[in-house]
Image (cartoon, rainbow, N blue to C red):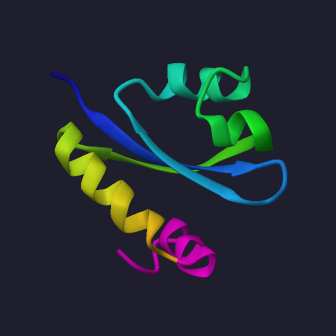
Amino acid sequence: MGSWFVYILECNDGSYYTGITCDLDRRLDEHKNGKGAKYTRIKGVKELLWHMTCGNRSIALKHEANIKSLSKAQKKQLMLNLII
């Protein structure tokens, strides 16, 4: 199986959405066209801020859970590669 990605989107209200996918382009299109997660359907998607390639779904899920536990400031640092 191919690579998996964990990603962070900025929503129209300035909030962040974190998710995983095995096809980043398709998933971004889904989010932007209102066919993605309920959160992004409600908030709308402004842009992809960050993504990381993971070896498999399990690793992507672990990174997603870790990122979701971060504060917004910590997520900004992550995207600037100041923390891992």
Q: Nearer the viewer, residue 34 or 9?
A: 34
Q: Residue at x 32, y 44 (%)?
A: 53
Q: Residue furthest right?
A: 13
Residue 44 visible in the picture: no
Q: Is residue 7 left or right of residue 38?
A: left
Q: Nearer the viewer, residue 76 or 64?
A: 64
Q: How many marks?
A: 0
Residue 42 visible in the picture: yes
Q: Quadrant of residue 54?
A: top left
Q: Residue at x 60, y 27 (%)?
A: 36
Relative to 4, residue 48 above or below = below
The quadrant of the picture occupied by the N terminus is top left
Magenta highlight on residue 28: no
Q: Is residue 58 left or right of residue 71?
A: left
Q: Is residue 50 left or right of residue 10?
A: left
Relative to 45, residue 66 above or below = below
Magenta highlight on residue 80: yes
Q: Position of residue 49 (x, y in %)?
A: 62, 52
Q: Position of residue 70 (x, y in %)?
A: 48, 75
Q: Residue at x 35, y 74 (%)?
A: 84
Give the extent of the magenta segment.
71-84
Q: Nearer the viewer, residue 70 or 25?
A: 70
Q: Residue at x 59, y 34 (%)?
A: 37
Q: Is residue 55 left or right of residue 45?
A: left
